[in-house]
Image: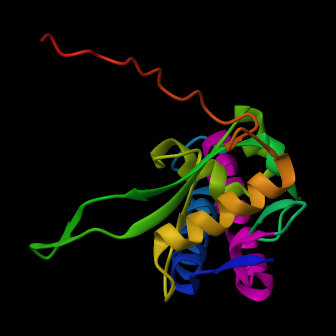
Amino acid sequence: MVVEIKGFKPAVGGMLGFGLLANIVAVATLVNQRIPMGAAVCILALGLALTITAIRAFLTQRYQLRATEQGVSFAGSALVAWSEIDQIFVARIKSPIDRVSNTPALVAITFRHKRTLFRLPLTYWISSPFSIGDVDIALYKMFEPPYSIVAHLQALRAQAVGTVDGVTVGASDLPSAQVIERPR
């Protein structure tokens, strides 16, 4: 079984526009020498990194997430093994747009080790501090319900990692429960 979540081209276009704007600002400041050379070079480096990443994503990216039995690939990056993934869950962010409340669904993924994030593309590094999980995947133009997608991902994870007594190996601990007797 393979689960794919398609990419969102307008977001890549926005990143491309921001990268080009940063490049123009950096070149203009280098020519006019209004700010120190080091700051202009840093802005130029950031702009070039965003521009190159956006062009690559725009031309080659077909999906944001692709999950197979071996692991998960984010935007065509290296494969992340299922044993590196701690949790997969549906996250919702309430975002009022033009006085209309909108609650888009996201698939949030947390990793066992935070260093796993550095194996992903640069765009995930930048968005990670603002994410609910370590990585949030937006479900644009997905006709399948978000809980169904998460269930498929959890099934792939359980198949790869295994289960013990119905609980995925390495999953977060279940809360302890106590039996409370009523007084008679």
Question: Residue furthest toward the top?
Answer: 183
**Quarter of the image with the C terminus in it:** top left
Image-based side of 44 in relation to 76, left or right:
left
Segment colored magenta: 38-67
Q: Position of residue 81 (x, y in %)?
A: 86, 50
Report the front residue among 124 and 178: 178
Which residue is found at the position 63% from the left and 80% from the top?
7
Which residue is found at the position 82% from the left and 71% from the top?
76
In the rendered view, would you say 161 is above or below 98? above
**Quarter of the image with the N terminus in it:** bottom right
Res 53 → quadrant: bottom right
Which residue is found at the position 14% from the left and 10% from the top?
183
In the rendered view, would you say 47 is above or below 129? below
> Magenta: predominant secondary structure element?
helix
Total residue callouts: 0
In the rendered view, would you say 175 is above or below 55? above
Res 104 → quadrant: bottom left
Question: Within the magenta stretch, is there residue 55?
Answer: yes
Question: Residue furthest toward the left?
Answer: 99
Question: Within the magenta stretch, is there residue 72?
Answer: no
Q: Position of residue 114 (x, y in %)?
A: 70, 33
Report the front residue among 175 and 45: 175
Q: Position of residue 88 (x, y in %)?
A: 59, 52
Q: Position of residue 119 (x, y in %)?
A: 82, 48
Image-based side of 72 in relation to 22, left or right:
right
Report the front residue among 183 and 10: 183
Image-based side of 80 in relation to 53, left or right:
right
Report the front residue among 183 and 35: 183
